Image: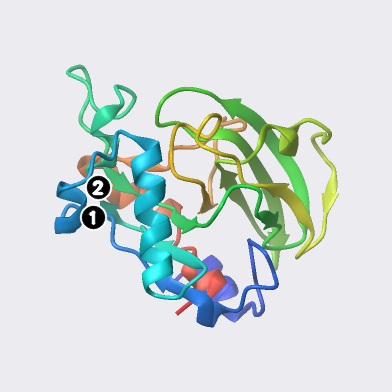
């Protein structure tokens, strides 16, 4: 375990969505290529996909479905941004998704400042996206919050100081979040490079080793399980 991962593991009481929902109301969700139920579902239809998530939560009496780090998925085949003839297919998810209804409050994982934000429009993209910069024990790193509402990025500016647990956004609906069932894509990034308001959340198999090293498992910080 490297220095940043050790720091993340030692931080307690971190929430990135609605603080009133206890972890006991979270349930794992497998959206990998191994999920047989997904093969029967038209995942290109965000309405059907949202019903699938809602039914999944209702059947298990849960409020939040989570998962997806280092998960190979077929969800991205519908978008040329991930699946085209010119580049290697990107189908491995390198953030953690938290599936819950649109309008749910999104919270800052840690103290920090606003690094950047953007509306990443397009099928399969993040939609409104916010990135925070953090400095802890001489470690500089970033947290990304994707699939937000448009209002979340309209009254903020780069450099704004953010406190741990502060509401920084709300979740967007399928009309503006890249055409997904509402959820938060949460990702930790060590070296963000020149990226601004955006960073890959899905990678190819050949790039997986790099991205797993540069984007530690968010559950080290969130400790959902």
Measured as percent of width and height from the top left, residue 158 is found at 79, 35
Looking at the image, residue 136 sits to the left or right of residue 124; the answer is: right
Measured as percent of width and height from the top left, residue 3 is found at 53, 69
Q: Residue furthest top?
A: 86
Image quadrant in which you'd find residue 221: bottom right
Image quadrant in which you'd find residue 136: bottom right
Q: Residue at x 48, y 73 (%)?
A: 26
Looking at the image, residue 89 sits to the left or right of residue 100; the answer is: left
**36 above or below 79?**
below
Q: Residue at x 70, y 58 (%)?
A: 107
Q: Nearer the viewer, residue 206 or 102?
A: 102
Please identify the quadrant where the C terminus is shown: bottom left
Residue 189 seen by the camera: no
- SS for callout 2: loop
Q: In the rendered structure, are the residues bearing label 1 and label 2 in contact, judged by CB atoms less than 8 Å apart?
A: yes
Q: Which residue is mark 1?
A: 32
Measured as percent of width and height from the top left, residue 104 is found at 65, 54
Residue 225 seen by the camera: yes
Could you give the CA–CA distance between mark 1 and mark 2, rounded to whole angstroms? Answer: 5 Å
Please identify the quadrant where the N terminus is shown: bottom left
Assess disc 2: are there few (<14), some (14-19) or many (≥20) residues with their C-alpha within 10 Å of its C-alpha.
many
Measured as percent of width and height from the top left, residue 211 is found at 37, 48
Residue 92 image label:
none
Assess disc 1: are there few (<14), some (14-19) or many (≥20) residues with their C-alpha within 10 Å of its C-alpha.
some
- SS for callout 1: loop
Q: Which residue is mark 2?
A: 73
Q: Nearer the viewer, residue 175 or 133?
A: 175
Q: Nearer the viewer, residue 61 or 179?
A: 61
Task: Name the colouring of the figure.
Answer: rainbow
Q: Residue at x 22, y 42 (%)?
A: 74
């Amino acid at each position: 375990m490297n220095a940043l991962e050790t720091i993340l593991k030692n931080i307690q009481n971190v929430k990135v969505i609605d603080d009133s929902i206890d972890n006991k109301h979270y349930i794992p969700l497998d959206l990998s290529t191994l999920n047989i139920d997904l093969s029967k579902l038209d995942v290109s239809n965000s309405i059907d996909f949202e019903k699938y998530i809602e039914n999944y939560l209702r059947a298990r009496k849960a409020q939040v479905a989570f998962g997806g780090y280092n998960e190979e998925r077929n969800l991205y085949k519908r978008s040329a941004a991930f699946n085209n003839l010119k580049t290697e297919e990107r189908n491995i998810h390198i953030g953690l998704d938290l599936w819950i209804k649109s309008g749910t409050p999104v919270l800052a994982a840690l103290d920090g400042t606003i690094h950047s934000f953007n509306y990443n429009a397009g099928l399969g993209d993040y939609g409104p996206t916010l990135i925070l910069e953090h400095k802890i024990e001489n470690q500089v790193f970033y947290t990304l919050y994707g699939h937000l509402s448009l209002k979340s990025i309209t009254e903020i500016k780069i450099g704004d100081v953010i406190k741990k647990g502060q509401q920084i956004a709300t979740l967007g609906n399928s009309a503006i979040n890249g055409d997904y069932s509402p959820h938060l894509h949460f990702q930790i990034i060590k070296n963000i490079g020149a990226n601004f308001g955006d960073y890959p959340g899905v990678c190819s198999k050949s790039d997986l080793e790099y991205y797993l090293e540069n984007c530690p498992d968010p559950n080290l910080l969130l400790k959902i399980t």
